[in-house]
Image (spheres, helix red, strand yellow):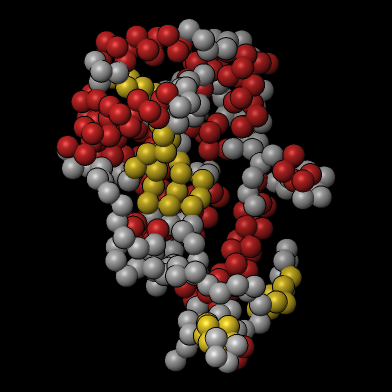
Protein backbone atom coordinates (compact mmCIF):
# COMPACT_ATOMS: atom_id res chain seq x y z
CA UNK A 1 0.00 0.00 0.00
CA UNK A 2 2.84 2.43 0.81
CA UNK A 3 5.39 0.75 -1.47
CA UNK A 4 7.54 3.01 -3.61
CA UNK A 5 8.13 0.94 -6.77
CA UNK A 6 6.43 2.05 -9.97
CA UNK A 7 6.51 -1.57 -11.13
CA UNK A 8 4.22 -2.45 -8.21
CA UNK A 9 1.84 0.34 -9.19
CA UNK A 10 1.75 -0.88 -12.77
CA UNK A 11 0.95 -4.36 -11.48
CA UNK A 12 -2.22 -2.86 -10.00
CA UNK A 13 -3.17 -1.11 -13.21
CA UNK A 14 -1.79 2.32 -12.29
CA UNK A 15 0.54 4.39 -14.43
CA UNK A 16 2.89 5.15 -11.52
CA UNK A 17 2.96 5.33 -7.76
CA UNK A 18 1.24 8.14 -5.91
CA UNK A 19 3.36 10.65 -4.02
CA UNK A 20 4.99 9.50 -0.79
CA UNK A 21 2.61 11.07 1.73
CA UNK A 22 -0.43 10.43 -0.45
CA UNK A 23 0.31 6.70 -0.27
CA UNK A 24 0.02 6.89 3.51
CA UNK A 25 -3.33 8.67 3.20
CA UNK A 26 -4.53 5.74 1.08
CA UNK A 27 -3.13 3.31 3.63
CA UNK A 28 -4.98 5.07 6.46
CA UNK A 29 -8.31 4.46 4.74
CA UNK A 30 -7.29 0.92 3.81
CA UNK A 31 -6.64 0.14 7.49
CA UNK A 32 -10.11 1.42 8.38
CA UNK A 33 -11.63 -0.94 5.81
CA UNK A 34 -9.74 -4.04 7.00
CA UNK A 35 -10.44 -3.23 10.67
CA UNK A 36 -14.14 -3.16 9.85
CA UNK A 37 -13.87 -6.56 8.16
CA UNK A 38 -11.60 -8.27 10.70
CA UNK A 39 -13.16 -6.81 13.84
CA UNK A 40 -16.73 -5.93 12.94
CA UNK A 41 -18.24 -8.48 10.59
CA UNK A 42 -18.45 -11.76 12.56
CA UNK A 43 -19.53 -11.91 16.18
CA UNK A 44 -17.44 -14.09 18.48
CA UNK A 45 -20.09 -16.80 18.71
CA UNK A 46 -21.20 -16.68 15.07
CA UNK A 47 -19.57 -20.01 14.18
CA UNK A 48 -21.73 -23.00 15.16
CA UNK A 49 -20.28 -26.01 13.30
CA UNK A 50 -23.57 -27.77 13.99
CA UNK A 51 -23.43 -30.95 11.91
CA UNK A 52 -26.85 -32.15 13.04
CA UNK A 53 -28.56 -29.03 11.74
CA UNK A 54 -26.07 -28.63 8.89
CA UNK A 55 -25.25 -25.12 10.04
CA UNK A 56 -21.71 -23.74 9.87
CA UNK A 57 -22.58 -20.30 11.21
CA UNK A 58 -25.47 -18.21 12.46
CA UNK A 59 -26.18 -15.71 9.66
CA UNK A 60 -27.77 -13.27 12.12
CA UNK A 61 -24.37 -12.85 13.73
CA UNK A 62 -22.48 -12.09 10.53
CA UNK A 63 -22.79 -8.44 9.58
CA UNK A 64 -22.48 -6.58 6.33
CA UNK A 65 -19.63 -4.06 6.20
CA UNK A 66 -20.32 -0.84 4.32
CA UNK A 67 -17.66 1.72 3.54
CA UNK A 68 -17.65 4.60 1.11
CA UNK A 69 -14.55 6.72 1.20
CA UNK A 70 -12.19 8.63 -1.02
CA UNK A 71 -10.15 5.61 -2.10
CA UNK A 72 -12.23 2.54 -1.24
CA UNK A 73 -15.87 1.50 -1.49
CA UNK A 74 -17.18 -1.68 0.05
CA UNK A 75 -20.53 -3.39 0.62
CA UNK A 76 -19.77 -6.95 1.67
CA UNK A 77 -19.27 -9.48 4.45
CA UNK A 78 -15.93 -10.74 5.68
CA UNK A 79 -15.63 -13.93 3.65
CA UNK A 80 -14.34 -16.24 6.37
CA UNK A 81 -14.61 -16.63 10.11
CA UNK A 82 -12.15 -14.56 12.16
CA UNK A 83 -8.93 -16.07 13.42
CA UNK A 84 -8.32 -16.22 17.19
CA UNK A 85 -6.51 -12.89 16.80
CA UNK A 86 -9.05 -11.35 14.41
CA UNK A 87 -6.69 -8.59 13.24
CA UNK A 88 -3.30 -10.20 12.50
CA UNK A 89 -0.15 -8.78 14.06
CA UNK A 90 0.49 -5.47 12.31
CA UNK A 91 4.05 -4.94 11.10
CA UNK A 92 5.14 -1.66 9.52
CA UNK A 93 8.34 -0.46 7.92
CA UNK A 94 9.14 3.15 7.10
CA UNK A 95 10.49 5.82 9.41
CA UNK A 96 9.95 9.01 7.45
CA UNK A 97 7.90 11.67 9.25
CA UNK A 98 4.68 10.35 7.71
CA UNK A 99 5.76 6.76 8.12
CA UNK A 100 6.49 7.26 11.81
CA UNK A 101 3.07 8.83 12.32
CA UNK A 102 1.44 5.85 10.59
CA UNK A 103 3.47 3.41 12.70
CA UNK A 104 2.61 5.18 15.93
CA UNK A 105 -1.09 4.91 15.14
CA UNK A 106 -1.37 1.41 13.67
CA UNK A 107 1.75 -0.72 14.11
CA UNK A 108 2.34 -3.34 16.75
CA UNK A 109 5.80 -4.15 15.39
CA UNK A 110 8.02 -1.76 13.43
CA UNK A 111 11.07 -2.41 11.27
CA UNK A 112 13.40 0.61 11.26
CA UNK A 113 16.81 1.48 9.83
CA UNK A 114 19.72 3.57 10.98
CA UNK A 115 23.46 3.61 10.27
CA UNK A 116 24.26 4.46 13.92
CA UNK A 117 22.87 4.19 17.43
CA UNK A 118 22.20 7.94 17.42
CA UNK A 119 19.95 7.74 14.36
CA UNK A 120 18.16 4.59 15.57
CA UNK A 121 17.51 6.03 19.03
CA UNK A 122 16.03 9.19 17.55
CA UNK A 123 13.65 7.10 15.43
CA UNK A 124 12.65 4.92 18.39
CA UNK A 125 12.03 7.96 20.59
CA UNK A 126 9.94 9.61 17.87
CA UNK A 127 7.71 6.58 17.30
CA UNK A 128 7.12 6.06 21.02
CA UNK A 129 6.39 9.77 21.58
CA UNK A 130 3.90 9.80 18.71
CA UNK A 131 2.27 6.61 20.02
CA UNK A 132 1.73 8.25 23.41
CA UNK A 133 0.18 11.25 21.65
CA UNK A 134 -2.24 8.80 19.97
CA UNK A 135 -3.26 7.52 23.41
CA UNK A 136 -1.39 4.24 23.00
CA UNK A 137 1.08 2.62 25.39
CA UNK A 138 4.47 3.49 23.82
CA UNK A 139 6.02 0.29 25.18
CA UNK A 140 3.45 -1.82 23.31
CA UNK A 141 5.18 -1.12 19.99
CA UNK A 142 7.88 -3.71 19.39
CA UNK A 143 10.69 -2.10 17.38
CA UNK A 144 13.35 -3.97 15.39
CA UNK A 145 16.34 -2.38 13.68
CA UNK A 146 18.11 -3.97 10.73
CA UNK A 147 21.66 -5.15 11.41
CA UNK A 148 24.21 -7.52 9.88
CA UNK A 149 26.24 -9.72 12.22
CA UNK A 150 29.36 -11.52 11.01
CA UNK A 151 30.37 -14.05 13.65
CA UNK A 152 33.63 -15.94 14.03
CA UNK A 153 34.98 -18.22 16.68
CA UNK A 154 37.35 -15.39 17.58
CA UNK A 155 37.37 -11.65 16.92
CA UNK A 156 40.32 -12.10 14.55
CA UNK A 157 38.48 -14.77 12.54
CA UNK A 158 35.39 -12.57 12.24
CA UNK A 159 37.40 -9.51 11.18
CA UNK A 160 39.23 -11.58 8.55
CA UNK A 161 35.89 -12.79 7.24
CA UNK A 162 34.60 -9.19 7.07
CA UNK A 163 37.72 -8.04 5.21
CA UNK A 164 37.23 -10.85 2.70
CA UNK A 165 33.58 -9.88 2.16
CA UNK A 166 34.54 -6.24 1.65
CA UNK A 167 36.98 -7.17 -1.10
CA UNK A 168 34.02 -8.18 -3.24
CA UNK A 169 32.00 -4.97 -2.88
CA UNK A 170 31.00 -3.33 -6.15
CA UNK A 171 30.64 0.41 -5.60
CA UNK A 172 28.63 0.74 -8.80
CA UNK A 173 26.34 -2.09 -7.73
CA UNK A 174 25.90 -0.62 -4.24
CA UNK A 175 25.08 2.81 -5.68
CA UNK A 176 22.54 1.26 -8.05
CA UNK A 177 20.93 -0.56 -5.11
CA UNK A 178 20.81 2.63 -3.06
CA UNK A 179 19.31 4.51 -6.00
CA UNK A 180 16.61 1.89 -6.42
CA UNK A 181 15.65 2.22 -2.76
CA UNK A 182 15.78 6.00 -2.53
CA UNK A 183 15.33 7.42 -6.02
CA UNK A 184 18.68 9.23 -5.60
CA UNK A 185 21.25 8.56 -8.35
CA UNK A 186 24.62 8.63 -6.57
CA UNK A 187 26.50 8.04 -9.83
CA UNK A 188 25.99 11.72 -10.70
CA UNK A 189 28.35 12.74 -7.88
CA UNK A 190 32.07 12.35 -7.22
CA UNK A 191 32.83 9.40 -4.97
CA UNK A 192 34.32 11.58 -2.26
CA UNK A 193 31.59 14.24 -2.41
CA UNK A 194 29.33 14.54 0.64
CA UNK A 195 25.85 13.11 0.24
CA UNK A 196 23.07 15.65 0.73
CA UNK A 197 19.40 15.23 1.54
CA UNK A 198 17.18 15.05 -1.55
CA UNK A 199 13.43 14.60 -1.17
CA UNK A 200 11.95 11.79 -3.21
CA UNK A 201 8.87 9.60 -3.39
CA UNK A 202 10.86 6.47 -2.51
CA UNK A 203 12.35 5.51 0.90
CA UNK A 204 12.80 8.93 2.46
CA UNK A 205 14.02 7.64 5.82
CA UNK A 206 17.04 6.04 4.18
CA UNK A 207 18.25 9.33 2.73
CA UNK A 208 17.49 11.03 6.05
CA UNK A 209 19.54 8.41 7.89
CA UNK A 210 22.69 9.36 6.01
CA UNK A 211 22.07 13.13 6.06
CA UNK A 212 19.75 15.20 8.25
CA UNK A 213 19.18 12.55 10.93
CA UNK A 214 22.71 13.12 12.22
CA UNK A 215 24.11 16.50 11.17
CA UNK A 216 27.37 15.75 13.00
CA UNK A 217 28.18 12.85 10.66
CA UNK A 218 28.91 13.75 7.04
CA UNK A 219 28.83 10.74 4.71
CA UNK A 220 30.55 10.72 1.33
CA UNK A 221 29.15 8.86 -1.65
CA UNK A 222 31.97 6.32 -1.34
CA UNK A 223 31.24 5.70 2.34
CA UNK A 224 27.54 5.19 1.67
CA UNK A 225 28.31 2.74 -1.14
CA UNK A 226 30.75 0.79 1.04
CA UNK A 227 28.20 0.75 3.86
CA UNK A 228 25.41 -0.50 1.60
CA UNK A 229 27.75 -3.03 -0.04
CA UNK A 230 27.47 -5.46 2.87
CA UNK A 231 24.19 -6.07 4.60
CA UNK A 232 22.33 -3.26 2.85
CA UNK A 233 20.91 -0.51 5.04
CA UNK A 234 22.03 -1.45 8.55
CA UNK A 235 25.30 -1.44 10.48
CA UNK A 236 27.69 -4.37 10.22
CA UNK A 237 29.11 -5.94 13.40
CA UNK A 238 31.87 -8.55 13.33
CA UNK A 239 33.31 -10.48 16.23
CA UNK A 240 33.32 -13.53 18.44
CA UNK A 241 30.06 -14.74 20.01
CA UNK A 242 30.93 -12.88 23.20
CA UNK A 243 31.79 -9.67 21.36
CA UNK A 244 28.63 -9.77 19.26
CA UNK A 245 26.46 -10.53 22.28
CA UNK A 246 27.97 -7.51 24.06
CA UNK A 247 27.32 -5.36 20.99
CA UNK A 248 23.72 -6.50 20.57
CA UNK A 249 22.92 -5.94 24.24
CA UNK A 250 24.49 -2.50 23.93
CA UNK A 251 22.27 -1.61 20.99
CA UNK A 252 19.15 -2.60 22.93
CA UNK A 253 20.30 -0.68 26.01
CA UNK A 254 21.44 2.46 24.18
CA UNK A 255 18.67 2.85 21.60
CA UNK A 256 15.52 1.43 23.20
CA UNK A 257 14.89 -1.12 20.45
CA UNK A 258 13.34 -4.49 21.29
CA UNK A 259 15.20 -6.68 18.81
CA UNK A 260 16.88 -7.03 15.45
CA UNK A 261 15.89 -7.72 11.86
CA UNK A 262 19.01 -9.62 10.82
CA UNK A 263 20.35 -8.99 7.33
CA UNK A 264 23.18 -11.01 5.81
CA UNK A 265 26.42 -10.83 3.89
CA UNK A 266 26.04 -14.33 2.47
CA UNK A 267 23.00 -16.59 2.53
CA UNK A 268 22.69 -18.99 4.26
CA UNK A 269 26.18 -18.68 5.76
CA UNK A 270 25.47 -15.50 7.77
CA UNK A 271 22.38 -17.03 9.39
CA UNK A 272 23.96 -20.44 10.01
CA UNK A 273 26.95 -18.81 11.71
CA UNK A 274 24.68 -16.66 13.85
CA UNK A 275 22.53 -19.60 14.95
CA UNK A 276 25.51 -21.87 15.65
CA UNK A 277 27.77 -19.33 17.35
CA UNK A 278 25.81 -16.38 18.73
CA UNK A 279 22.42 -17.79 19.76
CA UNK A 280 23.93 -20.12 22.41
CA UNK A 281 25.79 -17.17 23.94
CA UNK A 282 22.60 -15.06 24.03
CA UNK A 283 20.70 -17.96 25.59
CA UNK A 284 23.35 -18.34 28.28
CA UNK A 285 22.86 -14.66 29.11
CA UNK A 286 19.10 -15.12 29.34
CA UNK A 287 18.31 -12.63 26.57
CA UNK A 288 17.12 -15.10 23.91
CA UNK A 289 14.38 -17.69 24.24
CA UNK A 290 15.06 -21.42 24.51
CA UNK A 291 11.63 -22.36 23.19
CA UNK A 292 8.45 -20.92 21.73
CA UNK A 293 5.80 -19.60 24.10
CA UNK A 294 2.30 -21.06 23.68
CA UNK A 295 -0.55 -19.19 22.03
CA UNK A 296 -0.99 -16.91 19.08
CA UNK A 297 1.66 -14.56 17.72
CA UNK A 298 0.13 -11.69 19.67
CA UNK A 299 0.25 -13.74 22.87
CA UNK A 300 3.90 -14.56 22.19
CA UNK A 301 4.57 -10.82 22.02
CA UNK A 302 2.32 -9.53 24.80
CA UNK A 303 1.54 -12.47 27.07
CA UNK A 304 -1.11 -15.15 27.69
CA UNK A 305 -4.68 -14.18 26.95
CA UNK A 306 -3.76 -11.14 24.87
CA UNK A 307 -5.01 -12.44 21.55
CA UNK A 308 -6.87 -9.36 20.42
CA UNK A 309 -5.85 -5.81 19.65
CA UNK A 310 -5.18 -3.77 22.78
CA UNK A 311 -8.02 -1.51 23.89
CA UNK A 312 -5.92 1.58 23.10
CA UNK A 313 -5.33 0.47 19.49
CA UNK A 314 -7.46 2.34 16.91
CA UNK A 315 -8.61 -0.91 15.33
CA UNK A 316 -10.25 -2.01 18.57
CA UNK A 317 -13.04 0.55 18.19
CA UNK A 318 -14.39 -1.39 15.21
CA UNK A 319 -15.01 -4.53 17.28
CA UNK A 320 -18.61 -5.72 17.55
CA UNK A 321 -20.25 -4.89 20.86
CA UNK A 322 -21.87 -8.24 21.51
CA UNK A 323 -23.49 -7.02 24.72
Question: x, y (%) of residue 18?
Answer: 73, 48
Query: Quick check: can you spot residue 101?
Result: no
Please tell me whether residue 94 is drawn above or below residue 108 in the rendered image.
Answer: above
Please, which residue is most extreme toward the left here? 285
Q: Is residue 16 left or right of residue 89?
A: right
Question: x, y (%) of residue 183?
Answer: 66, 31
Q: Is residue 281 left or right of residue 232?
A: left
Query: Quick check: can you spot residue 38?
Result: yes
Q: Residue visible at 77% across and 46% down?
A: 11
Q: Residue visible at 72% across and 66% down?
A: 72
Which quarter of the rendering shows the C terminus?
Answer: bottom left
Please tell me whether residue 42 is drawn above or below residue 157 in the rendered image.
Answer: below
Q: Nearer the viewer, residue 47 or 308?
A: 47
Q: Is residue 136 left or right of residue 194?
A: left
Q: Nearer the viewer, residue 284 or 68?
A: 284
Question: x, y (%) of residue 3?
Answer: 64, 45
Q: Residue visible at 64% across and 38% down?
A: 202
Figure disc tally: 0
Q: Quadrant of residue 250?
A: top left
Q: Is residue 202 left or right of residue 102?
A: right
Q: Residue visible at 29% across and 66% down?
A: 304
Q: Nearer the viewer, residue 305 or 7?
A: 305
Question: x, y (%) of residue 275?
Answer: 33, 32
Q: Quadrant of residue 153?
A: top left
Amino acid sequence: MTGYLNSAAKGLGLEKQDRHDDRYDIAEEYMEVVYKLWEGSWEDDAVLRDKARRLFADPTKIHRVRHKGRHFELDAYQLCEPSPQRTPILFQAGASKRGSEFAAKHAECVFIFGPSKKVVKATVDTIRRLAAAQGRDPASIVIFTVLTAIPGRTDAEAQAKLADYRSYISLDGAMALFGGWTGVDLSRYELDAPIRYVESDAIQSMVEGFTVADPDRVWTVREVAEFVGIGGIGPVLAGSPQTLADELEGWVRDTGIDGFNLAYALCPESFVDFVDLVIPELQERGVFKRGYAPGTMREKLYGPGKRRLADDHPGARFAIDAS
